[in-house]
Amino acid sequence: YWSVHDNESTNGILPKGSCGSRNVFFGVAPQKGLCVTAAGTVMHGKLEGGKRVVKGMRSFEEIPHTGRNGWLNLLKFWRENRFQQLHKHMERTFNTLGPIYREKLGTLSSVNIMLPSDVSELFKSEGLHPQRMTLQPWATHREIRNHSKGIFLKNGEEWRADRLQLNKEVMMSAAVKRFLPLLDEVAKDFCQMLQTRMEKEGRGEKGKCVLTIDPSPDLFRFALEASCHVLYGERIGLFSSSPSLESQKFIWAVERMLTTTPPLLYLPPRLLLRMGAPLWTQHATAWDHIFSHAEARIQRGYQRLSTSLDRASPAGTAGSQYTGVLGQLMEKGQLSLDLIKANITELMAGGVDTTAVPLQFALFELGRNPEVQESVRQQVRVSWAQAGGDPHKALQGAPLLKGTIKEVLRLYPVGITVQRYPVRDIVLQNYHIPAGTLVQACIYPMGRSEKVFEDPLRFDPSRWSREEGQRVEAAGFRSLAFGFGARQCVGRRIAESEMQLFLMHILLSFHLSVPSSEDLNTTVTLILQPETPPRITFSKL
């Protein structure tokens, strides 16, 4: 089975037959006298895998739960404002009920788990076409507006075919090498902008200026600038003294879309649409703005590509200049223009907050852990000096940068769960889980659990390089912020590279500190973020 790191020979997709039968009966009842382990697969009355056998599997109904009435639970969630603190609710519930529990909220039922060994079993039964929980409000918006769906909202063979094409342009090593210089350029420009601002607004003697700011608005602009450069192959000038209102509106629209999604997950969107509910109207309007912004960029990219191809060499690669993911997909012609638009729009909508927010947490943790900051900086300096300006070599020589991102996402995962529907009956914690059950791996509680991590609240990027040499069972299932296997985040390589290059150039240019090292309070929209963005002090090195 797949480790969290892709096997690129299959483009990130499991080969046929490698992960269970596709012809399964959903909800097969357990047979009498089955022998099972704490985590395993039920097949024809015996356990696969040759693990220690324990008698007496317990039924699905016996799994501890938070209340049988989904509507009463949902009412309680709203009354007690638990949606915004869903990550803390999960942590408390695991502490109370143990490492597995059932929860029903409105129309949605799930089994929640948090131990890597259980997560390993879940992913072994994800099948050839893994499914996550469908974000129905997003799907409904596409249907009523007659937009094509991107891979985020697709399943089955249709998902697989599109995903294979996208992987070639955003996940494979060759693609990463093509877009790394673009991200590197944006990261350098961000540091230059910060340097200019420091000289104007900073305090202290010239050459020793310090600047204390809430960097979050700048980080959102950085993430949007970087995404546009990689996806469309163009700069949009967000680091100028007067960034465009159009781009700011896009950032606001993404934030509104993320905020309005969670409450809509537990209610039928089409009913709310018929009722004209303000919540639905806000959600749909936010998506409309996201689509119009992307549509304008895609049209410009299409015209630019058409012009350059007319003048191109016989090879037809627009003068061999990298044209961004959009240009590559259009040149290859394997996806229809509608599908390219759908997927580029999803990548744009999913690529701003999901990198800007972890960078807030990263600056904060590096600022309040000066020894860690200095050790990462020393490694970065050596690597950058030896790389001769090659960003790929620079990142390869600084594993602590990757460890920093993994550590930030362990403590502050962007999405707090990873979901799958097993294609066959499985056993978790000695409970029978029927095929087709929504199972959520809850990665916020996992990342902070003493059962999973030693000294879990300590920020220690070096823990990941230490672990790589250890063959711990299910070790690969302790870092799941980007998901897993064939259905992991399609923008993963862009996001990882973008965040690492950003931190690399920040650490080469500035010393970081924080006015307050108090723990940050966090809240969940669709993603985890600080209740109040932390202030960071930048000092010129």
Image (cartoon, rainbow, N blue to C red):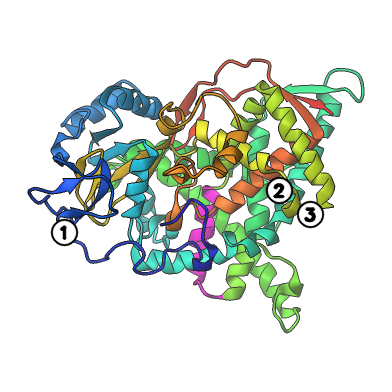
Image disc number at residue 395 = 2
Q: What's the amino acid at mark 1? A: His
Between 340 and 32, the one nearer to me in the picture = 32
In this figure, what is the number of numbered marks? Answer: 3
Q: Residues within 10 Å of mark 3 (few under 14, many from 20)?
A: some
Q: x and y percent of residue 103 in the render? A: 24, 34
Distance between the alpha carbons at the discs numbered 3 and 2: 9 Å
Quadrant where the image shows the N terminus: bottom left
Q: Secondary structure at mark 1?
A: loop
Image disc number at residue 390 = 3
Name which residue lies at 75% across and 72% down.
Answer: 320
Q: x and y percent of residue 350 in the render? A: 52, 48
Asked if residue 135 shows in the view, the reply is: no
188 left or right of 444 in image: right
Q: Secondary structure at mark 2?
A: helix
**Where are the magenta residues, as a range?**
333-350
Q: What's the amino acid at mark 3? A: Asp
345 left or right of 311 in image: left
Q: Residue furthest right?
A: 206
